[in-house]
Amino acid sequence: MRVADQVVTYVRRLHPAQRRAIKTALRALAAGRETDSKPLENELAGFSRLRVGQFRLVYRQLKNSELSCEFIETRKLVYQQFASIKELLADE
């Protein structure tokens, strides 16, 4: 699993209980267990979101079936902010 620097930095600022919840959800996602995840649409097609309480983690499945966690933010802000930086990720 690849995790972007923004995700690492953001999660480090959170309360320990929130950090644990996010890490637990990521482990479940990586293990293929059921999570509150769904594919995104329109300009964010190709990415999916993982819901963990008030947070949304945007990720994508890479060609080698590895997960790449791209961005995390609260629900209110995540899609606007991620859409503005998505073009940078397309080059990878």
Image (tube, rainbow, N blue to C red):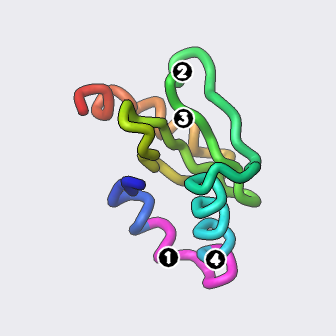
Label 1 or label 3, whichever comes before in sequence order: 1
Disc 4 + disc 1, Cβ < 8 Å:
no
Label 4 or label 1, whichever comes before in sequence order: 1
- At label 4, the amino acid type is Arg
Q: Mark 3, mark 2: which one is toward the viewer?
A: 2
Residue depicted at 32% across the width and 34% down the height:
89
The tag on residue 65 is none
Residue bearing mark 3: 80
The kind of secondary structure element at disc 3 is: helix
Residue 90: image quadrant is top left
Quadrant of the drawing holding the N terminus: bottom left
Query: Which is nearer the eye, 68 or 34?
Result: 34
Q: What predominant SS class does the magenta segment belong to? A: helix
Residue 72: say if magenta.
no
- At label 2, the amino acid type is Ala
Label 3 or label 4, whichever comes before in sequence order: 4
For this orientation, the residue located farthest to the left is: 91
Note whether residue 20 is visible.
yes
| Chain part drawn in magenta | 10-18
Residue depicted at 64% across the width and 29% down the height:
39
Check disc 3: other Cα within 10 Å, few if <14, some if 14-19, many if 20+: few
**Quick check: 69 above or below 60?**
below
The kind of secondary structure element at disc 4 is: helix
Residue bearing mark 2: 45
The kind of secondary structure element at disc 2 is: loop
- Label 3 to label 2: alpha-carbon separation: 14 Å
Residue depicted at 62% across the width and 27% down the height:
40
The tag on residue 20 is 4
Residue 12: say if magenta.
yes
